[in-house]
Image (spheres, rainbow, N blue to C red):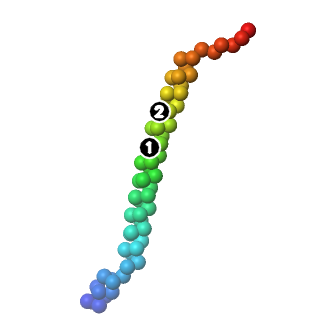
Amino acid sequence: MLTLIKAFAREERGAVATEYAFLIIFIALAIIAGLEYLGNGLNNLFSGIGSFVSGKTANIPS
């Protein structure tokens, strides 16, 4: 029984899979945070452009 426990403790395949899972989770969180920041920046940019354009009048020659 003690040999089985020692063999289980030396097994590293599960640890490697867990490390990859954590790596994938952290990368996904970084992507989500980056998209959130980018989305807010684009929203502010287009809101500013919309405000600028709505204050202008068209001079169309007749």
Residue pictured at 42% horizontal, 53% vertical: 30
Q: Residue furthest top?
A: 62
Q: What residue type is labelled 2?
A: Asn
Residue placed most toward the observer, 30 or 21 = 30
Q: Viewed as shown, does residue 3 lie left or right of 29? A: left
In front: label 2 or label 1: 2
In the picture, which quadrant includes the N terminus?
bottom left
Which sits earlier in the primary sequence, circle 2 or circle 1? 1
The residue positioned 44% from the left and 43% from the top of the image is 36
Instruction: Residue 31: give x, y in percent of width and height.
Output: 46, 52
What residue sits right under mark 1 in the picture?
36
- Under tag 2, what secondary structure? helix
Badge 1, how many Cα within 10 Å: few under 14, some, many 20+? Answer: few
Residue at the extreme left of the image, as rendered: 2
Please state, as top left, top right, bottom left or bottom right, where the C terminus lies in the image. Answer: top right
Vertical placement of 3 versus 55: above or below?
A: below
Residue at (47% x, 46% y) in the render: 35
Residue at image position (40%, 58%) is 26
Question: In terms of secondary structure, where does tag 1 sit?
Answer: helix
59 left or right of 23 in image: right
Sort mark 2 into few (<14), some (14-19) or many (20+) by Cα contacts within 10 Å.
few
Q: Mark 2 and mark 1: span between their CA atoms?
A: 12 Å
Residue 11, relative to residue 55: is it above or below?
Answer: below
Instruction: Give percent across and percent down for residue 43.
Output: 48, 34
Q: Is residue 58 above or below residue 10?
A: above
How many numbered tags mark residues here?
Answer: 2
- For residue 47, which numbered disc appears in the image? none
Residue 44, disc = 2
Dot 1 amino acid type: Glu
